Amino acid sequence: MESSMPLILGKCEFLNPGGSVKDRVALKVIEEALESGDLAPGGVVTEGSAGSTAISLATVAPAFGCKCHVVIPDDAAIEKSQILEALGATVERVRPVSITHKDHFVNIARRRALEANELAAKDKKVSQVDGKDREPMDGCVPDQEKENPALLSHCNGGFFADQFENLANFRAHYEGTGPEIWEQTDGNVDAFVAAAGTGGTVAGVSTFLQEKSPKIKCFLIDPPGSGLFNKVTRGVMYTKEEAEGRRLKNPFDTITEGIGINRLTKNFMMAKLDGAFQGTDKEAVEMSRFLLKNDGVFLGSSSAMNCVGAVRVAKALGPGHTIVTILCDNGMRHLSKFYDPKYLAQYGLTPTATGLEFMSIK
């Protein structure tokens, strides 16, 4: 067995009902919020998301009698907004700015939940003054009474899902994804690798697997423009000059979506990592086409980057090892960018490989 080729296994999270790994997070976040009372039945869940988490929340929320309002950066693939609207969510597209800016999409989503709670409290107070319960239409205040047209004024209040800092994200993978990987491989796993956006997946899975066996190595694969590789390998996120708060604009860093970040989240800080690798956009593009042609899987940009990481780890560990990664979503949400030849050509990312030579494999 020692002389055999490395085995790379991809967990097909794109087969979840909402089409991505984020279904796990959405379910856990909503269940915990309802149980704690932070989210009331009939309330609105808000989130700032580049796409997949929002789609999962919009898919899961109605099953619990709740609604969903999503704030999304306007440079995200347009098909993600279209899916959200088809699922019944309200969508607010905003310009991408630094997380330190009050109008970053995550900060706006947080405000929308507060506004929904204020409107709910106001509506309840008006009902008490009237001396009778006023029945809202379809769970909302009538149009003429809405203070914020961007957010349906749900009388049952709002809850900010907060996928980056809410540790329900970590728990979804510690209690679900990690145990499934262990069971589905019969414990025969030598390494796990994944990229991080919120950090929930890599943190939850790595923590669980290393509790089961300290011999299992866990790694990060980081896209261009992200500071996590430096944090894991050198202990420093980036230089003072690169501090996100000093950036005057949002630079173009990567065509991958939903992964890479320049701050430490509560979820990522839970990760148990043995090292990190960097991947390039060209490698992700080439990997997605290689897998489509050779394995018959149509993957999104973050899944492709995870597979780049898996090959990196396989090369580092050598023959006879089993490496697991996450296939987060499929390519259907990436048609307007990651799979658009004209878009790729603009950035010199047109795929040209015939095999895995882009990973230095003949």
Image (cartoon, rainbow, N blue to C red):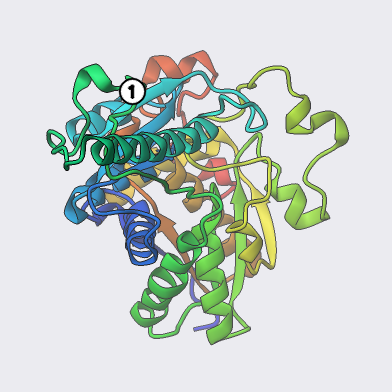
Q: Quadrant of residue 101?
A: top right
The residue that disc 1 covers is: 78
Task: Give the percent coordinates (x, y) of residue 176.
Answer: 38, 72
Task: Give the percent coordinates (x, y) of residue 268.
Answer: 61, 57
Task: Give the percent coordinates (x, y) of residue 81.
Answer: 31, 27
Is 270 in front, or is 138?
138
> The residue tagged with tag 1: helix, strand or loop?
helix
Going by the numbered disc 1, the residue's amino acid type is Ile
263 w.r.t. 194: above or below: above
* In-image side of 261 versus 134 (left or right): right
Q: Residue at x 34, y 67 (%)?
A: 35
Is 135 in front, or is 52?
135
Q: Residue at x 36, y 47 (%)?
A: 291
Q: Outermost residue, right direction? A: 240
Is 136 in front, or is 16?
136
Q: Is residue 312 visible?
A: yes
